Amino acid sequence: MNVDPNLTKYMIKVRITADGVVEKPDVVGAIFGQTEGLLGEELDLRDLQKGGRIGRIEVEIDSKKGRTEGTVLIPSSLDQVESSILAAALETIDRIGPCKAKIDVESLEDVRVQKRQKVIERAESLYKKMSQSGKNISESIVQSVREEVERAEIISFGEEKLPAGPAIKDSDSIIVVEGRNDVLNLLKYGIKNTIAVQGTNIPKTVQDLSKERTVIIFLDGDRGGDLILKEMLQVADIDFVSRAPPGTEVEELTYKQIVKALRYKMPIAQYLSMKGMSGELKELNQKNQSEKSGTVISPPKKSVSETPDLPDHGETVEEYVRTVKEKENNEPSHVKEGDAEVKVQVEKVQENGVIDLQNSRFIETRAEYLLKEKLLEVYSNDGKVVASIPLAEAVDKLTGVSDGNTIISGGVVSQRLIDSALNAGIKNIYGVRLGHVTKKPAEMRVVTWDQRH
Protein backbone atom coordinates (compact mmCIF):
# COMPACT_ATOMS: atom_id res chain seq x y z
CA MET A 1 0.00 0.00 0.00
CA ASN A 2 1.44 3.38 -1.03
CA VAL A 3 1.47 6.18 1.52
CA ASP A 4 1.42 9.88 0.62
CA PRO A 5 5.00 11.12 0.96
CA ASN A 6 3.75 14.60 1.93
CA LEU A 7 2.22 13.27 5.15
CA THR A 8 3.62 15.33 8.00
CA LYS A 9 2.33 14.27 11.42
CA TYR A 10 -0.10 11.41 12.04
CA MET A 11 -1.43 8.30 10.33
CA ILE A 12 -4.95 7.07 11.07
CA LYS A 13 -5.22 3.33 10.46
CA VAL A 14 -8.78 1.95 10.14
CA ARG A 15 -10.01 -1.63 9.81
CA ILE A 16 -13.26 -2.13 7.81
CA THR A 17 -15.61 -5.14 7.56
CA ALA A 18 -18.64 -5.18 5.22
CA ASP A 19 -21.35 -7.84 4.88
CA GLY A 20 -21.24 -7.91 1.11
CA VAL A 21 -19.05 -7.06 -1.84
CA VAL A 22 -17.95 -3.41 -2.00
CA GLU A 23 -15.22 -1.58 -3.92
CA LYS A 24 -12.74 1.15 -3.10
CA PRO A 25 -14.89 4.06 -4.36
CA ASP A 26 -17.71 2.82 -2.09
CA VAL A 27 -15.41 3.02 0.93
CA VAL A 28 -14.11 6.52 0.11
CA GLY A 29 -17.67 7.74 -0.60
CA ALA A 30 -18.89 6.37 2.73
CA ILE A 31 -16.10 8.16 4.62
CA PHE A 32 -16.80 11.55 3.04
CA GLY A 33 -20.59 11.18 2.92
CA GLN A 34 -21.30 9.89 6.43
CA THR A 35 -18.93 12.29 8.23
CA GLU A 36 -20.18 15.40 6.34
CA GLY A 37 -21.58 17.95 8.79
CA LEU A 38 -20.85 15.66 11.76
CA LEU A 39 -17.88 17.65 13.08
CA GLY A 40 -18.72 21.14 11.82
CA GLU A 41 -17.09 23.20 9.10
CA GLU A 42 -13.64 23.27 10.74
CA LEU A 43 -13.25 19.45 10.56
CA ASP A 44 -15.13 18.78 7.32
CA LEU A 45 -13.10 16.14 5.47
CA ARG A 46 -13.60 17.64 2.01
CA ASP A 47 -12.42 21.08 3.13
CA LEU A 48 -9.49 19.59 5.04
CA GLN A 49 -8.39 17.62 1.99
CA LYS A 50 -8.67 20.67 -0.27
CA GLY A 51 -6.56 22.66 2.19
CA GLY A 52 -3.92 19.93 2.25
CA ARG A 53 -4.44 19.08 5.92
CA ILE A 54 -5.68 15.59 5.09
CA GLY A 55 -3.73 13.56 2.56
CA ARG A 56 -4.87 11.10 -0.04
CA ILE A 57 -6.99 8.32 1.47
CA GLU A 58 -5.54 4.89 0.68
CA VAL A 59 -7.88 1.87 0.62
CA GLU A 60 -6.88 -1.78 0.40
CA ILE A 61 -9.71 -4.33 0.50
CA ASP A 62 -10.34 -7.96 -0.40
CA SER A 63 -13.65 -9.73 -1.00
CA LYS A 64 -14.11 -13.41 -0.18
CA LYS A 65 -17.27 -15.51 0.08
CA GLY A 66 -19.57 -12.49 -0.11
CA ARG A 67 -17.72 -10.57 2.61
CA THR A 68 -15.29 -7.66 2.30
CA GLU A 69 -12.44 -6.81 4.67
CA GLY A 70 -9.64 -4.32 4.40
CA THR A 71 -7.60 -1.41 5.70
CA VAL A 72 -7.84 2.36 5.24
CA LEU A 73 -4.94 4.79 5.82
CA ILE A 74 -5.65 8.50 6.28
CA PRO A 75 -2.61 10.79 6.60
CA SER A 76 -3.22 13.89 8.75
CA SER A 77 -1.36 17.14 9.41
CA LEU A 78 -3.86 18.18 12.09
CA ASP A 79 -2.79 18.35 15.73
CA GLN A 80 -3.22 15.43 18.13
CA VAL A 81 -6.66 16.46 19.41
CA GLU A 82 -8.12 17.15 15.95
CA SER A 83 -6.68 13.95 14.50
CA SER A 84 -8.15 11.95 17.41
CA ILE A 85 -11.60 13.52 16.89
CA LEU A 86 -11.49 12.75 13.17
CA ALA A 87 -10.46 9.13 13.86
CA ALA A 88 -13.30 8.68 16.37
CA ALA A 89 -15.81 10.11 13.84
CA LEU A 90 -14.91 7.38 11.35
CA GLU A 91 -16.28 4.73 13.71
CA THR A 92 -19.78 6.21 13.30
CA ILE A 93 -19.92 4.88 9.71
CA ASP A 94 -22.29 1.90 9.63
CA ARG A 95 -22.83 1.32 5.91
CA ILE A 96 -20.58 1.13 2.87
CA GLY A 97 -22.48 1.20 -0.39
CA PRO A 98 -25.54 -1.03 0.00
CA CYS A 99 -23.95 -3.18 2.72
CA LYS A 100 -23.86 -3.01 6.48
CA ALA A 101 -20.35 -2.28 7.66
CA LYS A 102 -18.24 -1.97 10.79
CA ILE A 103 -15.24 0.36 11.14
CA ASP A 104 -12.65 0.12 13.91
CA VAL A 105 -9.71 2.51 14.37
CA GLU A 106 -6.67 0.27 14.90
CA SER A 107 -4.13 2.99 15.60
CA LEU A 108 -3.27 6.66 15.47
CA GLU A 109 0.50 6.80 14.95
CA ASP A 110 2.87 9.73 15.14
CA VAL A 111 4.93 9.15 11.98
CA ARG A 112 7.57 11.60 13.17
CA VAL A 113 8.59 9.10 15.86
CA GLN A 114 9.27 6.53 13.14
CA LYS A 115 11.21 9.09 11.16
CA ARG A 116 13.25 10.03 14.23
CA GLN A 117 14.08 6.37 14.86
CA LYS A 118 15.22 5.96 11.28
CA VAL A 119 17.33 9.12 11.59
CA ILE A 120 18.91 7.79 14.82
CA GLU A 121 19.68 4.37 13.35
CA ARG A 122 21.15 5.87 10.20
CA ALA A 123 23.19 8.40 12.19
CA GLU A 124 24.60 5.60 14.36
CA SER A 125 25.53 3.62 11.26
CA LEU A 126 27.27 6.61 9.68
CA TYR A 127 29.08 7.47 12.91
CA LYS A 128 30.37 3.91 13.35
CA LYS A 129 31.66 3.84 9.78
CA MET A 130 33.32 7.21 10.22
CA SER A 131 34.87 6.25 13.59
CA GLN A 132 36.09 2.90 12.29
CA SER A 133 37.56 4.51 9.21
CA GLY A 134 39.32 7.14 11.33
CA LYS A 135 40.61 4.50 13.73
CA ASN A 136 41.94 2.31 10.93
CA ILE A 137 43.70 5.29 9.37
CA SER A 138 45.18 6.23 12.74
CA GLU A 139 46.37 2.69 13.46
CA SER A 140 47.75 2.39 9.95
CA ILE A 141 49.76 5.59 10.36
CA VAL A 142 51.12 4.50 13.74
CA GLN A 143 52.03 1.05 12.42
CA SER A 144 53.68 2.49 9.31
CA VAL A 145 55.77 4.92 11.34
CA ARG A 146 56.75 2.19 13.79
CA GLU A 147 57.80 -0.19 11.02
CA GLU A 148 59.83 2.53 9.30
CA VAL A 149 61.61 3.36 12.56
CA GLU A 150 62.34 -0.30 13.20
CA ARG A 151 63.65 -0.83 9.68
CA ALA A 152 65.79 2.28 10.02
CA GLU A 153 67.25 1.09 13.34
CA ILE A 154 68.06 -2.50 12.44
CA ILE A 155 71.58 -2.87 11.06
CA SER A 156 73.72 -5.54 9.41
CA PHE A 157 76.64 -6.47 11.65
CA GLY A 158 79.84 -8.42 11.07
CA GLU A 159 81.16 -10.33 8.09
CA GLU A 160 77.96 -12.37 7.86
CA LYS A 161 75.83 -9.17 7.89
CA LEU A 162 73.71 -10.44 10.77
CA PRO A 163 70.52 -8.56 11.75
CA ALA A 164 71.25 -6.56 14.91
CA GLY A 165 70.17 -3.59 16.97
CA PRO A 166 72.10 -0.30 16.76
CA ALA A 167 73.57 -0.70 20.28
CA ILE A 168 75.33 -3.97 19.43
CA LYS A 169 78.59 -2.13 18.65
CA ASP A 170 79.01 -0.43 22.04
CA SER A 171 76.98 -2.36 24.62
CA ASP A 172 78.83 -4.32 27.33
CA SER A 173 76.15 -7.03 27.20
CA ILE A 174 74.37 -8.49 24.18
CA ILE A 175 71.19 -10.49 23.68
CA VAL A 176 71.51 -13.31 21.16
CA VAL A 177 68.25 -14.34 19.45
CA GLU A 178 67.36 -16.71 16.63
CA GLY A 179 66.13 -14.59 13.71
CA ARG A 180 65.54 -11.16 12.21
CA ASN A 181 61.92 -10.98 13.41
CA ASP A 182 63.09 -11.55 16.99
CA VAL A 183 65.42 -8.54 16.66
CA LEU A 184 62.56 -6.42 15.25
CA ASN A 185 60.23 -7.37 18.09
CA LEU A 186 62.80 -6.42 20.73
CA LEU A 187 63.56 -3.16 18.88
CA LYS A 188 59.85 -2.33 19.00
CA TYR A 189 60.10 -2.24 22.80
CA GLY A 190 63.36 -0.30 22.93
CA ILE A 191 65.81 -3.21 23.39
CA LYS A 192 68.65 -2.42 20.97
CA ASN A 193 71.63 -4.59 22.03
CA THR A 194 70.44 -7.64 20.08
CA ILE A 195 71.89 -9.85 17.37
CA ALA A 196 70.46 -12.85 15.49
CA VAL A 197 72.34 -16.08 14.73
CA GLN A 198 70.07 -16.90 11.74
CA GLY A 199 70.00 -20.66 12.31
CA THR A 200 71.74 -23.41 14.26
CA ASN A 201 75.11 -22.80 12.59
CA ILE A 202 76.51 -20.14 14.93
CA PRO A 203 78.29 -17.37 12.95
CA LYS A 204 81.92 -16.47 13.78
CA THR A 205 80.86 -12.89 14.58
CA VAL A 206 78.69 -14.13 17.46
CA GLN A 207 81.46 -16.49 18.63
CA ASP A 208 83.93 -13.58 18.80
CA LEU A 209 81.45 -11.26 20.54
CA SER A 210 80.76 -13.90 23.20
CA LYS A 211 84.42 -13.81 24.27
CA GLU A 212 84.31 -10.05 24.84
CA ARG A 213 80.80 -9.30 26.09
CA THR A 214 78.30 -10.59 28.63
CA VAL A 215 75.99 -12.84 26.58
CA ILE A 216 72.31 -13.49 27.26
CA ILE A 217 70.87 -16.04 24.86
CA PHE A 218 67.10 -15.49 24.42
CA LEU A 219 65.53 -18.53 22.79
CA ASP A 220 62.12 -19.66 21.53
CA GLY A 221 60.19 -22.07 23.73
CA ASP A 222 60.45 -24.96 21.26
CA ARG A 223 62.88 -27.64 20.10
CA GLY A 224 64.61 -25.20 17.75
CA GLY A 225 65.67 -23.15 20.76
CA ASP A 226 67.11 -26.28 22.40
CA LEU A 227 69.23 -27.05 19.35
CA ILE A 228 70.64 -23.51 19.12
CA LEU A 229 71.54 -23.59 22.82
CA LYS A 230 73.47 -26.85 22.36
CA GLU A 231 75.34 -25.43 19.36
CA MET A 232 76.16 -22.21 21.23
CA LEU A 233 77.54 -24.20 24.16
CA GLN A 234 80.03 -25.89 21.86
CA VAL A 235 81.40 -22.84 20.03
CA ALA A 236 80.68 -19.74 22.17
CA ASP A 237 80.74 -18.44 25.74
CA ILE A 238 77.27 -17.99 27.26
CA ASP A 239 76.62 -16.23 30.57
CA PHE A 240 72.82 -16.31 30.92
CA VAL A 241 69.82 -18.09 29.37
CA SER A 242 66.28 -16.70 28.87
CA ARG A 243 63.45 -18.68 27.28
CA ALA A 244 60.12 -17.73 25.76
CA PRO A 245 57.13 -19.58 27.30
CA PRO A 246 56.74 -23.18 25.99
CA GLY A 247 55.30 -23.29 22.48
CA THR A 248 55.87 -19.58 21.77
CA GLU A 249 58.51 -17.61 19.86
CA VAL A 250 60.41 -14.46 20.82
CA GLU A 251 59.03 -12.62 17.78
CA GLU A 252 55.44 -12.93 19.07
CA LEU A 253 56.01 -12.00 22.73
CA THR A 254 54.44 -8.91 24.30
CA TYR A 255 56.45 -6.29 26.19
CA LYS A 256 55.42 -7.78 29.55
CA GLN A 257 56.46 -11.30 28.49
CA ILE A 258 59.83 -10.06 27.21
CA VAL A 259 60.60 -8.15 30.41
CA LYS A 260 59.59 -11.13 32.55
CA ALA A 261 61.75 -13.56 30.56
CA LEU A 262 64.82 -11.30 30.71
CA ARG A 263 64.30 -10.52 34.40
CA TYR A 264 64.33 -14.24 35.24
CA LYS A 265 67.38 -15.07 33.14
CA MET A 266 69.47 -17.86 34.64
CA PRO A 267 73.24 -18.37 34.79
CA ILE A 268 74.17 -20.99 32.21
CA ALA A 269 75.57 -23.50 34.74
CA GLN A 270 72.43 -23.29 36.88
CA TYR A 271 70.21 -23.66 33.81
CA LEU A 272 72.04 -26.78 32.60
CA SER A 273 71.93 -28.32 36.07
CA MET A 274 68.23 -27.74 36.46
CA LYS A 275 67.48 -29.05 32.98
CA GLY A 276 69.39 -32.26 33.70
CA MET A 277 71.95 -31.64 30.94
CA SER A 278 74.82 -33.35 32.75
CA GLY A 279 76.94 -33.87 29.62
CA GLU A 280 76.76 -30.22 28.57
CA LEU A 281 77.39 -29.09 32.18
CA LYS A 282 80.50 -31.27 32.41
CA GLU A 283 81.87 -29.81 29.18
CA LEU A 284 81.13 -26.30 30.44
CA ASN A 285 83.01 -26.95 33.69
CA GLN A 286 85.99 -28.37 31.77
CA LYS A 287 85.99 -25.30 29.57
CA ASN A 288 85.92 -22.97 32.58
CA GLN A 289 88.75 -24.88 34.31
CA SER A 290 90.90 -24.71 31.18
CA GLU A 291 90.38 -20.96 30.93
CA LYS A 292 91.40 -20.51 34.57
CA SER A 293 94.56 -22.63 34.14
CA GLY A 294 95.54 -20.84 30.95
CA THR A 295 95.27 -23.95 28.76
CA VAL A 296 92.75 -24.60 26.06
CA ILE A 297 90.93 -27.93 25.98
CA SER A 298 88.69 -28.47 22.99
CA PRO A 299 85.77 -30.67 24.02
CA PRO A 300 84.66 -33.28 21.48
CA LYS A 301 81.87 -32.01 19.22
CA LYS A 302 78.55 -33.77 19.51
CA SER A 303 76.09 -34.11 16.73
CA VAL A 304 72.54 -33.00 17.41
CA SER A 305 71.29 -36.60 17.32
CA GLU A 306 73.74 -37.57 20.13
CA THR A 307 72.65 -34.86 22.53
CA PRO A 308 69.66 -35.56 24.80
CA ASP A 309 66.40 -33.68 24.34
CA LEU A 310 65.75 -30.92 26.84
CA PRO A 311 62.64 -31.53 28.97
CA ASP A 312 60.57 -28.37 29.12
CA HIS A 313 58.00 -28.44 31.91
CA GLY A 314 57.11 -24.77 31.77
CA GLU A 315 57.97 -24.14 35.48
CA THR A 316 59.04 -20.81 36.93
CA VAL A 317 62.59 -20.26 38.23
CA GLU A 318 61.49 -20.95 41.80
CA GLU A 319 59.81 -24.20 40.72
CA TYR A 320 62.95 -25.32 38.87
CA VAL A 321 65.04 -24.78 42.03
CA ARG A 322 62.53 -26.61 44.20
CA THR A 323 62.30 -29.52 41.72
CA VAL A 324 66.07 -29.99 41.54
CA LYS A 325 66.43 -29.88 45.34
CA GLU A 326 63.70 -32.49 45.76
CA LYS A 327 65.41 -34.74 43.21
CA GLU A 328 68.79 -34.33 44.93
CA ASN A 329 67.31 -35.11 48.38
CA ASN A 330 64.93 -37.92 47.43
CA GLU A 331 66.32 -39.74 44.40
CA PRO A 332 69.57 -41.77 44.01
CA SER A 333 71.81 -41.03 41.07
CA HIS A 334 71.25 -44.44 39.41
CA VAL A 335 68.20 -45.27 37.33
CA LYS A 336 65.20 -46.58 39.30
CA GLU A 337 63.81 -49.99 38.56
CA GLY A 338 60.46 -48.44 37.57
CA ASP A 339 62.12 -46.49 34.75
CA ALA A 340 62.50 -49.66 32.70
CA GLU A 341 58.78 -50.31 33.05
CA VAL A 342 57.98 -46.72 31.99
CA LYS A 343 60.26 -47.06 28.96
CA VAL A 344 58.53 -50.31 27.96
CA GLN A 345 55.10 -48.70 28.26
CA VAL A 346 56.19 -45.73 26.15
CA GLU A 347 57.22 -48.17 23.42
CA LYS A 348 54.00 -50.18 23.77
CA VAL A 349 51.73 -47.19 23.36
CA GLN A 350 53.31 -46.60 19.96
CA GLU A 351 52.57 -50.23 19.00
CA ASN A 352 49.04 -50.92 20.26
CA GLY A 353 47.78 -47.62 21.71
CA VAL A 354 47.22 -49.01 25.25
CA ILE A 355 48.67 -47.53 28.47
CA ASP A 356 48.45 -48.10 32.22
CA LEU A 357 46.55 -45.06 33.50
CA GLN A 358 47.49 -46.00 37.08
CA ASN A 359 51.21 -45.36 36.44
CA SER A 360 51.74 -41.66 37.22
CA ARG A 361 55.39 -41.72 36.11
CA PHE A 362 54.40 -42.99 32.70
CA ILE A 363 51.67 -40.35 32.41
CA GLU A 364 54.23 -37.60 33.04
CA THR A 365 56.64 -39.14 30.53
CA ARG A 366 53.84 -39.33 27.97
CA ALA A 367 52.89 -35.71 28.67
CA GLU A 368 56.50 -34.62 27.96
CA TYR A 369 56.25 -36.28 24.56
CA LEU A 370 52.89 -34.62 23.85
CA LEU A 371 54.35 -31.23 24.87
CA LYS A 372 57.00 -31.52 22.16
CA GLU A 373 54.49 -32.72 19.57
CA LYS A 374 51.83 -30.15 20.64
CA LEU A 375 49.18 -32.85 20.96
CA LEU A 376 46.37 -33.95 23.29
CA GLU A 377 45.40 -37.62 23.64
CA VAL A 378 42.08 -39.08 24.84
CA TYR A 379 42.01 -42.53 26.46
CA SER A 380 39.18 -44.92 27.24
CA ASN A 381 38.62 -46.41 30.67
CA ASP A 382 40.82 -49.44 29.81
CA GLY A 383 43.74 -47.29 28.61
CA LYS A 384 43.18 -47.43 24.86
CA VAL A 385 43.92 -44.33 22.77
CA VAL A 386 40.56 -43.01 21.53
CA ALA A 387 41.79 -39.85 19.80
CA SER A 388 44.94 -37.79 19.19
CA ILE A 389 44.18 -34.10 18.59
CA PRO A 390 46.42 -31.04 17.89
CA LEU A 391 46.36 -28.70 20.91
CA ALA A 392 45.08 -25.79 18.80
CA GLU A 393 41.96 -27.79 17.84
CA ALA A 394 41.39 -29.69 21.10
CA VAL A 395 38.56 -27.58 22.56
CA ASP A 396 36.49 -27.74 19.37
CA LYS A 397 37.11 -31.40 18.50
CA LEU A 398 36.65 -32.90 21.98
CA THR A 399 32.87 -32.65 21.66
CA GLY A 400 32.98 -35.19 18.83
CA VAL A 401 34.93 -37.78 20.87
CA SER A 402 32.98 -40.65 22.45
CA ASP A 403 34.03 -43.35 24.98
CA GLY A 404 36.68 -41.01 26.45
CA ASN A 405 37.60 -41.23 30.15
CA THR A 406 41.03 -39.61 30.50
CA ILE A 407 42.96 -36.81 28.78
CA ILE A 408 46.74 -36.37 28.72
CA SER A 409 47.60 -32.94 27.31
CA GLY A 410 50.91 -31.46 26.23
CA GLY A 411 49.58 -27.95 26.93
CA VAL A 412 47.79 -25.72 29.42
CA VAL A 413 44.60 -26.99 31.09
CA SER A 414 42.24 -24.05 30.55
CA GLN A 415 38.65 -23.41 31.62
CA ARG A 416 37.49 -23.94 28.01
CA LEU A 417 39.26 -27.31 27.87
CA ILE A 418 37.65 -28.40 31.17
CA ASP A 419 34.17 -27.34 29.97
CA SER A 420 34.59 -29.16 26.65
CA ALA A 421 35.96 -32.27 28.41
CA LEU A 422 33.02 -32.29 30.83
CA ASN A 423 30.59 -32.28 27.90
CA ALA A 424 32.52 -35.21 26.37
CA GLY A 425 32.23 -37.25 29.58
CA ILE A 426 35.92 -36.99 30.59
CA LYS A 427 36.70 -37.85 34.25
CA ASN A 428 40.48 -37.24 34.46
CA ILE A 429 42.74 -34.55 32.92
CA TYR A 430 46.56 -34.53 33.10
CA GLY A 431 48.40 -31.49 31.71
CA VAL A 432 51.56 -29.41 31.76
CA ARG A 433 50.22 -26.36 33.56
CA LEU A 434 46.93 -25.13 35.04
CA GLY A 435 45.62 -21.99 33.33
CA HIS A 436 43.04 -19.51 34.62
CA VAL A 437 40.36 -21.89 35.88
CA THR A 438 37.41 -20.42 37.76
CA LYS A 439 35.15 -23.48 37.98
CA LYS A 440 36.35 -27.08 38.26
CA PRO A 441 33.65 -29.79 38.33
CA ALA A 442 33.59 -31.88 41.52
CA GLU A 443 33.34 -35.12 39.52
CA MET A 444 36.47 -34.36 37.44
CA ARG A 445 40.10 -34.94 38.52
CA VAL A 446 42.60 -32.37 37.17
CA VAL A 447 46.36 -32.87 37.73
CA THR A 448 49.14 -30.67 36.28
CA TRP A 449 52.92 -30.58 36.72
CA ASP A 450 52.92 -27.14 38.31
CA GLN A 451 50.62 -28.49 41.03
CA ARG A 452 52.77 -31.56 41.65
CA HIS A 453 56.17 -29.88 41.98
Image: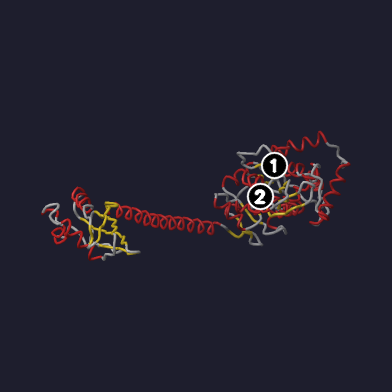
Residue type, numbered disc 2: Phe
Between 329 and 133, the residue placed more toward the observer is 133
Amino acid at pointer 1:
Glu
- Which quadrant is the N terminus positioned in? bottom left
The quarter of the rendered structure image containing the C terminus is: top right
Please say which color scheme the image uses: secondary structure
User: Residue placed at 67% from the left, 59% from the top?
Assistant: 198
Residue 211 vs residue 336, the one in the foreground: 336
Report x, y in % for residue 379: 75, 49
Considering depth in this image, is 159 or 68 the residue closer to the camera? 68
Question: Residue at image x 25%, y 61%?
Answer: 99
Residue 257 x/y as whole percent:
60, 46
Say whether residue 106 is left or right of residue 51. Answer: right
Question: Most extreme residue toward the top, as rendered?
Answer: 329
Of residues 303 and 64, the one drawn nearer to the viewer in this rendering: 64
Q: CA distance from mark 1 to mark 2?
A: 17 Å
The residue identified by callout 1 is: 315
Q: Which mark is residue 218?
A: 2
- Residue 135 visible in the current orientation: yes
On the picture, is 50 further left or further right than 97?
left
- Give the vertical position of 448 relative to 199 (above or below): above
Marks 1 and 2, the one that precedes in the sequence? 2
- Above-or-below relation of 342 to 323: below
User: Which element is circle 1 on?
Assistant: loop
Residue 284 appears in the rendering: no
